[in-house]
Image (cartoon, grey):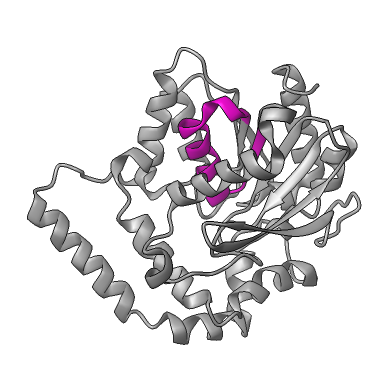
Amino acid sequence: MPNDNPNPDWGESNFWQWQGFSCHWRVIGTENTRPLVFLHGFGASTEHWRHNAFPFAKAGFRVYGIDLIGFGKSDQPGVKEIKRLDNHLWARQVTAFLQEIVETNKRGKAVLIGNSLGSLTALTTAVIRPEIVAAVIAAPLPDPALMNPMSFDQTHWMKKLKTFLVHLFFYLFPLELLIPIISRTSLLKIALQSAYFKSITFDKDLLRLVSQPAKRATAPQSLRAMCIGMSLRPREFTAPHLLEVLSNRSSRQPFLMIWGCNDNFVPLMLGQKLQRQHPWLSLYEMKSTGHCPHDESPQEFNKKVLSWLDLNSVIN
């Protein structure tokens, strides 16, 4: 893979307390320049932006990355501590981060760049706090609700039954047994390879940055909280509804979707469908690239995002 000072341990590493949880974040770049925040995908962390942080800082951004609650070096709370982990909670975490750490009131609106789950979090943040978000880059934009729209016209007892069954299933599912096995065997490498088009056989940094958080004793309980939270989200926090909200606004942030043509997790046809439904969305297709375009084809990714930001007058 092409490199430009690729360092998983990029920037200055810090911790920040939010609602009683320890959150890990990184920063690199000159102060008093346009803030840009990276939001990682499922199972990843700030380290996954190893090929992107330095080039964007070099381009004149103050670059931040944050480990969402449940991932990376941030706390991994379970259902007892947090009840549910979902994109609304992560968006609230990002909003607080923008206000307290990035200080958007002083430095101006921030550019949000997300991969997968981070893209959904970026979209949610842009909807609930549009005044602090300058632009969104979603690479790509996943949500099960985009593929199989959920039915929200349910009676009270049906909702209670669904809640009970979801909790029962994920409490009985042996995550405490499965997660350690997956994180310590070749199963993890197999799963990771399915997210990439090119071979990751010799990418030891990638395997390490994904496996280390999964090996923590609190990883299974946090994954359970996320499974429950994402399964029981209200309609207003699903991607279809969030995009409709943006569509109905007279003024909205520039929004770019970047999709790998060989994405095995979220097929390109979904991105094309979203652009047809919402013509204000920009879509860029990357050939010979899978689910992590920022990491698999970083030079093309960085160049495209920077030129798009310049075209949309987001770069200072």
Residue 302, given in percent of the width and then of the height, sits at 78, 38
Residue 112 picture location, percent across and down: 64, 37
Which quadrant is home to the C terminus? top right
Left or right side of 164 for 96:
right
Q: Is residue 87 above or below residue 310?
A: below
Q: Residue at x 73, y 64 (%)?
A: 199
What residue span does the magenta drawing correspond to? Answer: 111-135
Which residue is situated farthest in the top direction here?
250
> Residue 245, how many percent across, how many down?
39, 26
Could you say which quadrant of the image residue 159 lies in? bottom left
Q: In the drawing, does residue 150 fall left or right of residue 289?
A: left
Residue 5 visible here: yes
Image position of 17 (left or right of 239): right
Query: Residue 23's image quarter?
Result: bottom right
Image coords of residue 125 (percent x, y): 52, 38
Residue 116 inside the magenta-drawn segment: yes
Vertical placement of 188 versus 315: above or below? below
- Can residue 282 be seen here? no
Count the marks: how many?
0
Main SS, magenta region, reads: helix
Queried whether the magenta region covers residue 103, the answer comes back as: no
Q: Is residue 258 found left or right of 237 in the rendered image?
A: right
Given residues 310 and 276, the one toward you in this image is 310
Residue drawn 48% across the image and 77% down it: 220
Q: Residue at x 46, y 69 (%)?
A: 223
Q: Quadrant of the N terminus?
A: bottom right
Q: Nearer the viewer, residue 129 or 215?
A: 129
Q: Residue at x 38, y 72 (%)?
A: 80
